[in-house]
Amino acid sequence: MDVPLRLSATDMRELGYQAVDQVVDHLATLRERPVGGPSDRKEIEALLDGGLPIEPGDAFEVMSEAVRQVRDNIVHTDHPRFLAYIPGPSTYVGAVADFLASGLNVFAGQWLVGAGPAVMERITIDWLRTVCGFPATAGGLFVSGGTMANLVAIHAARTRNGDGHGHGDGDGDGDGDGDGDGDGDGLVYVTSQTHGSIRQGLGFIGFRPDQIRVVGTDAHQRMDVASLRKHIARDEHAGLWPTCVVATAGTTNTGAVDPLDELADLCAEHDLWLHVDGAYGAAAVLSERAGGLLSGLGRADSIALDPHKWWFQPYEAGCVLVRDESALLDAYSMNAEILRETRHGSAPLNYYDIGPQLTRGFRALKLWMSFKTFGLDGFQQAIEHGIELAEHAEKQLGGDRWEIVSPAQLAIVTFRPRVPGATKDQVDALTRRIAAGTLEDGFALILTTEIHGRPVLRLCVTHPETTARDIEDVIALLERLADEASRLRPGGSDPA
């Protein structure tokens, strides 16, 4: 008798073999193919919208259609010449881990049905807390990405019990109002370089605009400690409740790292929670080339990591670490009638007690398998490679053609074209045209960000298979696009 929604063992095996072949072919031939190009929504909808399927179809034909339509209508963020954003490259081992976690249908929310995965996640978290310099009291969990990791940590900071963090009032919510509702007047300190998802996301977890302070930055786009000190002093004098400072280890605009040691000193002085958004840059703690940039990371109260960035994992993989895991228990521990038996057993690990999800997938497996396969040395070499290539790019961009706006920091360098006689507006327009030109060309992708209100081209080098030759070829492409966009030719003078 046929079993509903189940293929035969033979067909499942063959479908899996073909899926593996598709992924391996993608990875093996990626360098020879374009990064991607502009998409037309109407065309894609016309291709994919065949109506709701009522009758069963052939699984092999369905998979072939899915691979074709997806592969042909995405920008390949895992391409060695995708230099536009930080996320992208991932290990095949991580992809296999995702397949196994899905195929085994692991429920990683509670101990009763996922004891083995819970211990594997705890071990992987322990590896990360060791790398980041956190003590044995630390803990954490995997979440969807950096956005959730940051917000989970900041909510924990706000609801921390009165044990030396925040202004405890005896009701356990740390909001200073004694009513236990968690919506008090705690203040969060950010900068203009704090990731936009954090500034937006603070509203999701109940912070009003008047509870958010934007601190000044120094000449290197880092949080200015003197400015922060003034903000805190003014707020304390007004009888308000400074709660959390959000520092960044590797800003998305320029790769800047806030002065973590100085911030840790200031936070300790004023009894504030120091959270570090290290979604991308914290991975550079493995790198000797990063020097002392990450000094002080281990002094934070919480850190957000994004293993699908510079830890080379498939999407989605975020991680939140806290110096004292009880802070997460205070913020998220949940009791419900249906969960009574999940607390049985030997020291059960229930991740619904330390994070906002009850139902959650087994995200830790991919990093566990990748660490076990390649070792910490392999990750260190890959991160060092990105830093070296960004420095190589800066050298190649030096000269008369390009203005370096922010030098290579971690794996990011920003720049814009030099056009003698052109106005700022003309240079800005040309900068944006160059970025748009890379998308249309397809060989590589470079996009813009803004520094001091003006666009710059931003080159992010995190792919372990990107080469120095790739960087040189991409710069040559940018120069050609600059010439075409500005109608400049050798000996020409029209900057428009």
Image (cartoon, rainbow, N blue to C red):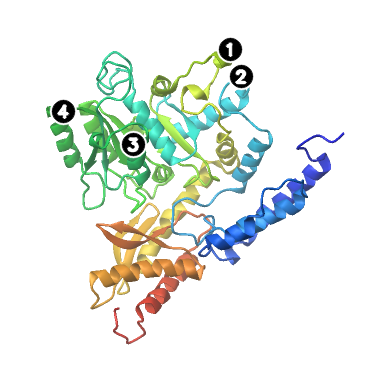
- First reached walking from the N terminus: tag 3 or tag 2: 2
Farthest residue toward the right?
A: 1
Q: At x 25% / y 58%, what residue is drawn? A: 453
- First reached walking from the N terminus: tag 3 or tag 4: 3
Pointer 4: what residue? Answer: 236
Q: How many residues crowd around disc 2 within 10 Å: few (fewer than 14), some, or many (20 or more)? A: some
- Label 3, label 2: how many angstroms apart (C-alpha)? 35 Å
- Label 2, label 4: how many angstroms apart (C-alpha)? 46 Å
Indicate the secondary structure of the residue bearing disc 1. loop
Please indicate whether residue 357 sits to the left or right of residue 456 in the image.
right
Q: Quadrant of residue 293?
A: top left
Q: At x 31% / y 36%, what residue is drawn? A: 296
Indicate the secondary structure of the residue bearing disc 3. helix
- First reached walking from the N terminus: tag 2 or tag 4: 2
- Label 1, label 3: how many angstroms apart (C-alpha)? 37 Å
Residue 203: numbered disc: 3
Q: Quadrant of the C terminus?
A: bottom left
Where residue 85 appears, as percent x and y from the top left, is 44, 54
